[in-house]
Image (spheres, rainbow, N blue to C red):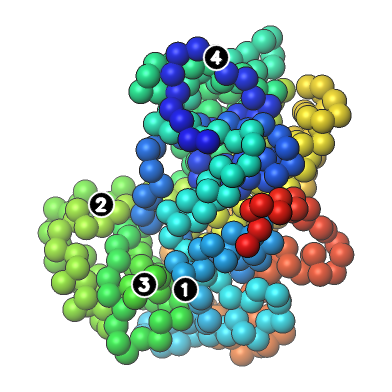
């Protein structure tokens, strides 16, 4: 069911603020477990560009198990290999087909079709409601316990009362702020400028390319239908200065890093309005829950764009939290929900910390400008590329930890069975 907030009060078991990958995956998994769930989303549509389009192999695997992958497959593009060039020369290559996994390939998947598929699947189940054009403006409380949210929509305000409120509202989470949960925001030394250009004919459309020159680097990621998503670093807060230099400053950066796309950039990016800027930071939240409230996805652990980990962890959060929350709702009171949320954080925190640590090390490597340190970076990449065991271990740790853990029996991610009526 899709609706907009209006006067009055509604009751549900779980209220999720934010209809991104974490929020909608969680809603679907809860609805499949017969939990009544209401999702509050401020946008009227899912048209989000330059957000979480890189899906790691573990996320592909989860989406397949959720029964969503087949619904969006026409909107995907597999990545078969990764190539890093530093100073114009190849320093690392990885072939994802070399990894014996159920889902070995990362994918490019724009968020609109993914979110639409999740919402459509959930809407077919009883107890699911999506409130569009609705903004959470206040947390409802009884003593120390969060009991829902006050929502402002086009028809006025509504109180959505819930046993559990979930903050799935992203890296700038308003619900996290309203809850007063402390966190540390760690700004990195760069921001990122993003845009899309046509795929050059000389490039294989299934290769993820990283180009580095000193302390400047760019990501060149093939995406659907026949485009390349380009992102390059600029100094923190440096967009205003770069824009003062004119659009030619953007062209010069692309010419330096990837002249193969220069012509396409000049055709497709004629002004700064054709670009998007992403403020790069990571967020560490020591405590992800309060009585009646839990954070998921970027609200709990903002990551950087490196290696497409944000959506991966958002989906994994949802799959882990759903059975814990559903069991607590079915068999206990507020205390059992709080215990379930703490168990959720314990189950996920180590995986998130590992990804954050790897990203931070990669960020520092990208930022090196001293010639001696640049030489060491190139040597490190070449050593990894030439050592099959080391390369497999590092790549597996980045892209396949969930599949590896599931296959070895170290961890099982319990995905809810799909109702017969929603199976294809």
Q: Secondary structure at mark 2?
A: helix
Q: Secondary structure at mark 1?
A: strand
Q: CA distance from mark 1 to mark 2?
A: 30 Å
Give the residue at x 46% y 69%.
74
Which is more foreground, mark 2 or mark 4?
A: 4
SS of the residue under disc 4? strand
**Which residue is the site of mark 2?**
239
Left or right: residue 392 compared with residue 48: right
Q: How many marks?
A: 4
| Image height of 84 relative to 402, above or below | below
Q: Which mark is residue 77?
A: 1
Residue ID for mark 3: 225
Q: Is residue 216 above or below residue 153?
A: below
Element under disc 3: loop
The percent position of residue 413, horizontal first and vertical second, equals 77, 55
Instruction: Classify residue 357 by image quadrant.
Output: bottom right
User: Few, some or many C-alpha atoms within 10 Å of disc 3 (few <14, some 14-19, many ≥20)?
Assistant: few
Tell me if label 1 and label 2 are in contact, CB under 8 Å: no
Q: Is residue 153 left or right of residue 120?
A: left
Q: Which mark is residue 9?
A: 4
Q: Nearer the viewer, mark 2 or mark 3?
A: 3
Point out the tag, 2 or 3, that comes first from the N-terminus.
Answer: 3
Say which label, 4 or 1, has the lower sequence index: 4
């Amino acid at each position: 069911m899709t609706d907009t907030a209006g006067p009055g009060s509604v009751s549900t078991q779980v209220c999720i603020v934010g209809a991104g990958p974490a929020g909608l995956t969680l809603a679907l998994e809860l609805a499949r477990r017969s939990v009544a769930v209401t999702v509050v989303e401020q946008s009227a549509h899912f048209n989000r560009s330059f957000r979480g389009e890189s899906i790691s192999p573990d996320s592909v695997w989860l989406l397949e198990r959720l029964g969503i992958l087949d619904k969006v497959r026409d909107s995907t593009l597999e990545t078969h290999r990764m190539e890093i060039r530093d100073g114009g020369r190849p320093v690392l290559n990885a072939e994802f087909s070399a990894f014996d996994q159920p889902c070995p390939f990362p994918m490019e998947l724009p968020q609109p079709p993914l979110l639409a598929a999740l919402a459509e699947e959930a809407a077919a189940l009883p107890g699911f409601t999506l409130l569009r054009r609705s903004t959470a403006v206040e947390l409802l409380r009884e003593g120390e316990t969060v009991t829902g949210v006050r929502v402002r929509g086009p028809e006025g305000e509504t109180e959505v009362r819930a046993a559990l409120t979930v903050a799935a509202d992203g890296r700038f989470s308003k619900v996290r702020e309203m809850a007063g949960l402390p966190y540390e925001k760690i700004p990195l030394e760069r921001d990122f400028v993003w845009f899309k250009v046509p795929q050059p004919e000389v490039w294989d459309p299934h290769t993820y390319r990283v180009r580095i020159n000193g302390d400047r680097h760019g990501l060149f990621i093939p995406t659907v239908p026949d485009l390349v998503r380009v992102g390059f670093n600029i100094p923190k807060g440096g967009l205003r200065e770069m824009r003062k230099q004119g659009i030619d400053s953007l062209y010069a950066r692309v010419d330096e890093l990837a002249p193969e796309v220069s012509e396409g950039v000049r055709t497709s990016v004629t002004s700064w309005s054709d670009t998007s800027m992403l403020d790069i930071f990571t967020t560490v939240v020591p405590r992800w829950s309060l009585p009646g409230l839990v954070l998921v996805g970027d609200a709990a652990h903002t990551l950087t764009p490196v290696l497409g980990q944000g959506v991966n962890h958002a989906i994994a959060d949802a799959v882990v939290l759903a059975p814990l929350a559903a069991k607590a709702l079915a068999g206990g009171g507020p205390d059992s929900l709080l215990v379930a949320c703490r168990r959720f954080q314990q189950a996920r925190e180590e995986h998130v910390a590992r990804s954050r640590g790897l990203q931070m090390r990669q960020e520092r490597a990208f930022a090196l400008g001293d010639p001696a340190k640049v030489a060491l970076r190139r040597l490190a990449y070449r050593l990894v590329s030439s050592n099959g065991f080391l390369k497999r271990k590092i790549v597996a740790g980045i892209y396949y930890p969930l599949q590896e853990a599931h296959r070895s029996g170290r961890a099982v991610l319990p995905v809810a069975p799909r109702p017969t009526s929603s199976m294809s």
